[in-house]
Amino acid sequence: MMPSPMQGVMPRPLQSMQGMMPGARPPMQAGYRRPPMPMPVVEPKRPKMTNMDRVQQDNDQKMIESLLSRWYEVRKAGIELTEKRIKERGTLLKKIREETIQQQQATRRTEEQLIQDRNNLNLGVCNKQNANICYFT
């Protein structure tokens, strides 16, 4: 029986396990080092505020809080305002359409009147508007 070429040959150790006893396990946190202690954060000093500045800041804060608490009413008012503007535009467009229709009808009436007057002149008929220009055919 021939010995196999692998008998008696130890497997090569892994790179991370070199220098350790055979059969020993690496520690749980191999390669872990504690981070350095963080530097203490020094908060910058606030500038000294006068009473007027404090009152102004408090008023601003209250206004912001009231706006945030009333966001629903503000939003609803904005929606109502846009609806009102849309209605106003609609009525304005309706008026413009009615005026253009009236102008078109008036133009058509005057054109018909001019055609009728021309025809009356050709027939020799005189009316009050063109009594001084009366042609008989």
Image (cartoon, helix red, strand yellow):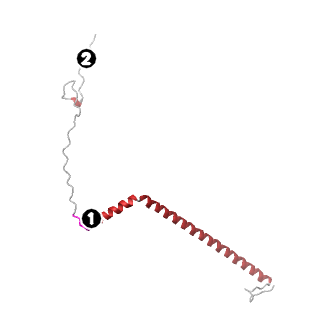
Front residue (pair 102, 57): 57
Identify the element where label 1 is drawn.
helix
Residue closest to the far right: 137
Front residue (pair 62, 137): 62
Residue type, numbered disc 2: Gln
Question: Residue 65 falls in which quadrant of the image?
Answer: bottom left
Query: For this view, does 134 lie left or right of residue 79?
Result: right
Residue type, numbered disc 1: Arg
Q: Residue at x 77, y 80 (%)?
A: 119
- Distance from disc 1 to disc 2, alpha carbons, whole Å, reads 86 Å
Q: What kind of secondary structure does the magenta stretch mostly adopt? A: helix
- Count of all numbered marks drawn on residues in the image: 2
Q: Residue at x 37, y 61 (%)?
A: 66
Residue 93 x/y as whole percent: 58, 68
Magenta region includes residue 71: no
Mark number, residue 54: 1
Residue 36 x/y as whole percent: 19, 44
Magenta region includes residue 53: yes
Front residue (pair 46, 136): 46
Residue closest to the far top: 1
Q: Which residues make up the magenta segment? A: 48-55
Q: Residue at x 62, y 71 (%)?
A: 98
Q: Residues within 10 Å of mark 1 (few under 14, many from 20)?
A: few
Q: Is residue 69 above or below residue 126?
A: above
Identify the element where label 2 is drawn.
loop
Q: Residue at x 61, y 69 (%)?
A: 97
Mark 2, residue position: 7
Query: For this view, does 6 lie left or right of residue 80?
Result: left
